[in-house]
Image (spheres, rainbow, N blue to C red):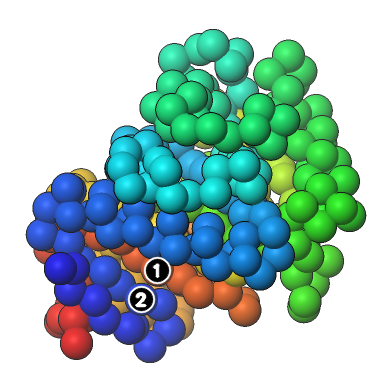
């Protein structure tokens, strides 16, 4: 059983003894959300990140989830994508396709990946346009408090520097307020060219889950969750700027990633 605690402003913090336990809890959480969303609005719009997250979602391809999840109602998006060919080893699409999407019966036309044959700027524009059409049709819900899309679930990994999606510390993409999808050409984590959801879109989601495991994430987890003074600089850490306005935030962490968390977040 994961230790679970509710942090005043930073959402629900779930701490797991092992990666195996974390993966099971993550699969349960996603399957439950999928069931609730399909019941409520007939669709489940989920946005994936890259990195270790995809491997940690692997249990969804196994029993019981492989049989019980209503895969035909899933609509897949990417919170961020590297601007490389879809067959390139760096592609987040390829990572998810090889390890998840090809193993469950998702409808191919429900998989919304970026155009990999244009520039980063064009890819971001086209992706935003595609999402706008899906919001009009309510395949993706719309926020009640802004004109942003309201994804049912946004899944984020966490970098040791506190980045989420392709929103890196001190980058101008962090302050983008108008675009839903923006692009960068100078990512400190290779490859340099990426597209990414902006913070207004991430923070308009119904549910946001941040998944982080391992000692290398401990400092970022501490800075992203623990109490902080308003002007100590931590408030501009991308992971700390993840603050769903009307949605629910959950942290899926292993013990190593929580080694610098102050106090116990377990109740
Ligand atoms: O495309 C990317 O690079 C990711 O979307 C990125 O935001 C990732 O999720 C984090 O860097 C964590 O990656 P790890 O879990 O592999 O450390």
Q: Which residue is mark 2?
A: 12
Q: Please identify the residue farthest to the front as the structure is shown.
A: 67
Q: Which mark is residue 219?
A: none
Residue drawn at (46%, 71%) of the image: 249
Q: Residues within 10 Å of mark 2 (few under 14, many from 20)?
A: some
Q: Which residue is mark 1?
A: 250
Quarter containing the N terminus: bottom left
**Quick check: is the Cβ at mark 1 less than 8 Å away from ligand 1?**
no
Quarter containing the C terminus: bottom left
Residue 228 visible (yes or no): yes
- Compared with residue 231, is residue 75 higher up or lower down, i.e. above or below? above
Q: Quadrant of residue 194?
A: top right
Residue drawn at (44%, 63%) of the image: 32
| 235 or 207: nearer the viewer | 207
In this rendering, would 126 be left or right of 46? right
Cα distance in 3D space between marks 1 and 2: 5 Å
| 150 or 41: nearer the viewer | 41
In percent of width and height, residue 218 lies at: 21, 57
| Helix, strand or loop for disc 1 | strand
| 1 or 150: nearer the viewer | 1
| Helix, strand or loop for disc 2 | strand
**Residue contact at pointers 1 and 2, CB within 8 angstroms:** yes
In this rendering, would 203 be left or right of 103? right
In percent of width and height, residue 24 lies at: 25, 53
In percent of width and height, residue 159 lies at: 36, 46
Residue drawn at (49%, 42%) of the image: 49
| 107 or 125: nearer the viewer | 107
């Amino acid at each position: 059983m994961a230790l679970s605690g509710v942090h005043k402003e930073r959402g629900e913090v779930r701490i797991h003894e092992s990666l195996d336990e974390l993966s099971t809890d993550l699969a349960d959480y996603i399957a439950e959300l999928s069931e609730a969303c399909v019941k409520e609005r007939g669709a489940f719009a989920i946005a994936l990140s890259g990195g270790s997250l995809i491997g940690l979602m692997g249990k969804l391809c196994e029993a019981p989830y492989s049989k019980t999840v209503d895969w035909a109602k899933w609509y897949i998006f990417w919170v961020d994508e590297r601007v490389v060919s879809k067959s390139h080893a760096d592609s987040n699409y390829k990572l998810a396709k090889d390890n998840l999407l090809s193993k469950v019966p998702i409808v191919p036309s429900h998989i919304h990946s970026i155009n990999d044959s244009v520039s980063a700027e064009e890819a971001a524009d086209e992706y935003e346009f595609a999402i706008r059409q899906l919001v009009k049709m309510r395949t993706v819900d719309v926020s009640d408090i802004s004109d942003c899309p309201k994804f049912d679930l946004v899944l984020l990994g966490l970098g040791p520097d506190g980045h989420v999606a392709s929103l890196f510390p001190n980058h101008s993409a962090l302050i983008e307020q108008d675009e839903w999808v923006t692009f960068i050409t100078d990512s400190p984590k290779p490859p340099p060219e990426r597209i990414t959801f902006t913070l207004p879109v991430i923070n308009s989601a119904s549910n946001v889950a941040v998944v982080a495991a391992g000692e290398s994430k401990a400092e970022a987890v501490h800075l992203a969750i623990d109490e902080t003074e308003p002007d100590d600089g931590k408030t501009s850490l991308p992971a700390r700027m993840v603050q769903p306005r009307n949605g629910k935030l959950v942290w899926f962490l292993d013990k190593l990633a929580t080694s610098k968390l102050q106090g116990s977040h377990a109740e």
